[in-house]
Amino acid sequence: MAELILAHEPAIRLTFFIGIFATMAFWEIVLPRRAASFSRWRRWPSNLSIVVLNSLLLHILLPGVAVGVALAGERNGWGLLDAATLPAWMKFALAIVLLDLAIYLQHVMFHALPALWRFHRMHHADPDFDVTTGGRFHTGEIIISAGYKLAIVVALGVPAASFVVFEVLLNATSMFNHSNIDLPLALDRALRWILVTPDMHRVHHSVERDETNSNFGFNLSWWDRLLGTYRAQPAAGHDEMTIGLDVFREPAQLRLDRMLLQPFVGPAGRYPIGARDV
């Protein structure tokens, strides 16, 4: 199974991306959770363009590097998991869980350090919340994240197949939990004991600073609950809450060129954890 996953990694990633994106986009059209502030024609071209730009850049700069490093680690016995006496299936599953914790911690770090927040705030500057928001990350953040993941792969000794499966899950759950879908409340309550749901993650995209600095999980909801960053609902309710930031709210900021410049414009602002709320 591992050999099959690695042999068809690009096709697996692309197939899951197209399938999940199409499903969520259709669901949003048929059963939306909230009314949009801007039309898809205003937002989607730039949001999807940044996804394509980031994918091409990583393909050119770091083609298969993470998987290659993971394979080298397996051959040479790198990392904590390799030192553990565990069956292969348990290492496979544990690696996925630990990678998810690492991404949670990375997300907190991007909110805590003003220099990193400058890049991450492009993701939060989206005035609406839908499936395309799940891929709207600044190229600088994507590059930093790629380096961070490489370090985690080496330190943990993540099996290559685990890394590929985790990346597919991360992309899929990011599109799911950013989707503007009307999930039945009973189903949302049940799912969020394990997974981050759209209603749970939407709180994280609130314009209110204390809500922005909560619900950092992308896949498993456990980390927010265990580490004290969980917030069940936005104070204003999901229908009335304001999405986005208190900066970059002009329609012109939806253009791709403006989005790419946002890390370098103005101060870091009041959102970084520990900053003064002024």
Image (cartoon, grey):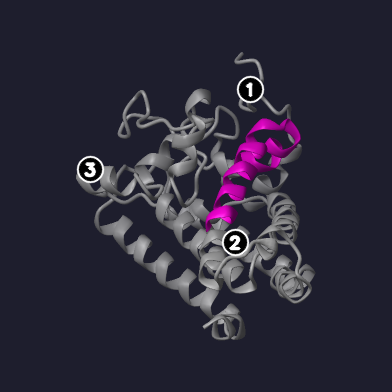
Mark 3 to mark 2: distance in Å?
31 Å
Please give the name of the residue rendered at 55% of the width and 70% of the height, measured from the top-left corner: 87
Q: Name the residue under label 2.
A: 51
Q: Of tags 3 and 2, which is closer to the observer?
A: 3
Q: Mark 3 points at which residue?
A: 185
Q: Report the predominant secondary structure element of the magenta stretch.
A: helix
Q: Position of residue 183 (x, y in %)?
A: 26, 49
Residue 96 occupies quadrant: bottom right
Q: Position of residue 128 (x, y in %)?
A: 44, 43
Three-letter code for the amino acid on which mark 2 is drawn? Val
Three-letter code for the amino acid on which mark 3 is drawn? Leu
Q: Is the residue under label 3 in contact with that under label 1 (CB below 8 Å)?
A: no
Left-right relation of 144 to 122: right
Q: Earlier in the sequence, mark 2 or mark 1?
A: 2
Mark 1 to mark 3: distance in Å?
32 Å
**Which image quarter is the C terminus in?**
top right
The boundaries of the magenta stretch are 97-122
Q: Which of marks 3 and 2 is nearer the N terminus?
A: 2
Which of 38 and 201 lies nearest the eye of the viewer? 201
Whether 221 is drawn above or below 88: the answer is: above
Left-right relation of 142 to 210: right
Left-right relation of 101 to 42: right
Q: Is the residue under label 2 in contact with that under label 3 (CB below 8 Å)?
A: no
Task: For mark 1, give the secondary structure.
Answer: loop
Q: Which of marks 1 and 3 is nearer the N terminus?
A: 3
Which of 151 and 48 lies nearest the eye of the viewer? 151
Q: Of tags 1 and 3, which is closer to the observer?
A: 3
Q: Where is residue 277 in the image (x, y as percent from the top left)?
A: 60, 15
Q: Mark 1 points at which residue?
A: 270
